[in-house]
Image (cartoon, rainbow, N blue to C red):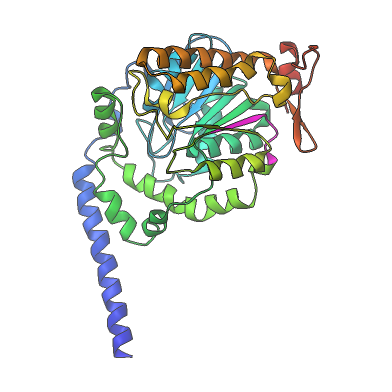
């Protein structure tokens, strides 16, 4: 009995000590008020229904919405990918609440519901009715939830390095006190391609409320949000979906990404020899190497082979196989162009049984562009 009481007392004191340690360190680390920060070059602060959002809005044409991974921000898309897509599209990216330079509020419940609602608010504030949604890592899960709950707003979905694997350290972070202590010492999350990006990333982590937001998200992922994804959502996606995975991705394995593709009924493509980045060989954005981006999954694979969308895979393989940085950059740009054609021309599909059927009238099986909006649900 005495041993049990002593153990309980030790645990209580230990947890209390961790909370105190965390509080003191967070006070040292989070010294910036968000209102004192300026938006990144090319970005802006946008007032929406739910709060102030740090937004990148560039280019003209059919809209593409880019959703970043956890703890990151629009900085991951700003160079390279966003610029490439903006040559022919309107590209929109934003920092989630609790991340980057977007707002933090004590009343926010950080997780999928908040960020899906934020995406809707951003599109509404920018007068965008529909978009193709590209999500990296957890952004892919958010994109799928968005497509289920707001199907009329989504033309198609691409997930990049998204799966259902949970890393062991996440369980440790869910422990009371321990998660607080770990996040309290975190100077920033991940790294960036350029010194300017790195400085912005570290600056965002000095904003008050950042670590609490990240920790709340991690814990919800282990409980409410995680259970939601396990029990449903992905099977209910009706938009055409393409899942991309690098064969050398050690965070989310191709097996996990493939399992997710089976649940959505979408197309799945593994890029050989690539992890979550292309060894940072590009001068452009980390995501160009990390994402091997796109959306050629708008319809049946055989039907798409004859279309611009089917051409994407060849371009992408050429980009990955290229040795010279300049050629990689060029080939990825070409691949993105074909991707965009797939979004614009191949067609938005609807489900028939287990597959995705093209709707519309071209002889080669691709729906004509005017049918795209009409078939969206």
User: Which image quarter holds the C terminus?
Assistant: top right
The residue closer to the viewer here, 85 or 366, is: 366
Vertical comparison of 167 with 100: above or below: below
Q: Magenta segment range?
A: 236-244
Vertical comparison of 230 with 281: above or below: below
| Camera sees residue 219 | yes
| Camera sees residue 127 | no
Question: What's the residue at 51%, 24% (across, down)?
Answer: 293
Q: Is residue 363 left or right of residue 163?
A: right
User: Which image quarter holds the N terminus?
Assistant: bottom left
Q: Is residue 271 left or right of residue 344?
A: left
Q: Which quadrant of the structure image shows residue 313?
A: top right
Vertical comparison of 106 with 46: above or below: below
The residue closer to the viewer here, 297 or 179, is: 297
**Residue 276 percent across, percent down from the top left:** 42, 34
Question: What's the residue at 25%, 55% (across, down)?
Answer: 22
Q: Which quadrant of the structure image shows residue 38?
A: top left
Question: What's the residue at 38%, 45% (across, down)?
Answer: 214
Q: Is residue 209 left or right of residue 221?
A: left
State yes or no: residue 161 in magenta: no
**Residue 167 percent across, percent down from the top left:** 43, 52
Number of numbered discs visible in the structure rendering: 0
**Residue 159 percent across, percent down from the top left:** 54, 33
**Residue 331 percent across, percent down from the top left:** 47, 14
């Amino acid at each position: 009995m005495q041993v049990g009481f002593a153990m309980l007392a030790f645990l209580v004191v230990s947890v209390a000590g961790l909370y105190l340690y965390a509080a003191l360190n967070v006070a040292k680390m989070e010294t910036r008020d968000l209102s004192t920060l300026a938006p990144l070059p090319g970005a802006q602060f946008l007032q929406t229904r739910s709060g102030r959002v740090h937004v990148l809005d560039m280019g003209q044409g059919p809209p593409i919405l880019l959703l970043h991974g956890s703890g990151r921000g629009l900085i991951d898309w700003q160079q390279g990918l966003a610029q490439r897509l903006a040559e022919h599209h309107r590209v929109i990216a934003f920092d989630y609440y609790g991340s980057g330079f977007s707002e933090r509020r004590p009343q926010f419940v950080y997780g999928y519901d908040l960020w899906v609602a934020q995406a809707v608010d951003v599109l509404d504030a920018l007068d965008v009715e529909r978009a193709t949604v590209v999500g990296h890592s957890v952004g892919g899960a958010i994109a799928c939830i968005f497509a289920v709950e707001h199907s009329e707003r989504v033309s198609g979905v691409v997930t990049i390095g998204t799966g259902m694997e949970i890393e062991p350290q996440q369980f440790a972070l869910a422990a009371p006190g321990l998660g607080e202590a770990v996040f309290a010492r975190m100077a920033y999350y991940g790294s960036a391609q350029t010194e300017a990006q790195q400085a912005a990333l570290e600056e965002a982590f000095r904003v008050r409320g950042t670590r609490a937001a990240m920790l709340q998200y991690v814990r919800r992922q282990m409980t409410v949000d995680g259970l939601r994804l396990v029990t449903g959502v992905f099977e209910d996606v009706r938009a055409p979906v393409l899942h991309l995975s690098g064969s050398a991705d050690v965070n989310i394995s191709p097996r996990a990404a493939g399992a997710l593709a089976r649940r959505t009924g979408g197309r799945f493509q593994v890029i050989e020899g690539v992890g979550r980045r292309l060894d940072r060989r590009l001068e452009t954005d980390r995501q160009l190497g990390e994402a091997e981006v796109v959306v050629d999954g708008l319809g049946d694979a055989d039907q798409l082979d004859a279309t611009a969308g089917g051409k994407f895979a060849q371009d992408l393989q050429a980009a990955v196989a290229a040795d010279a940085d300049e050629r990689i950059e060029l080939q990825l740009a070409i691949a993105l162009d074909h991707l965009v054609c797939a979004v614009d021309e191949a067609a938005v599909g609807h489900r028939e049984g287990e597959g995705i059927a093209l709707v519309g009238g071209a002889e080669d099986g691709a729906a004509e562009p005017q049918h795209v909006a009409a078939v969206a649900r």
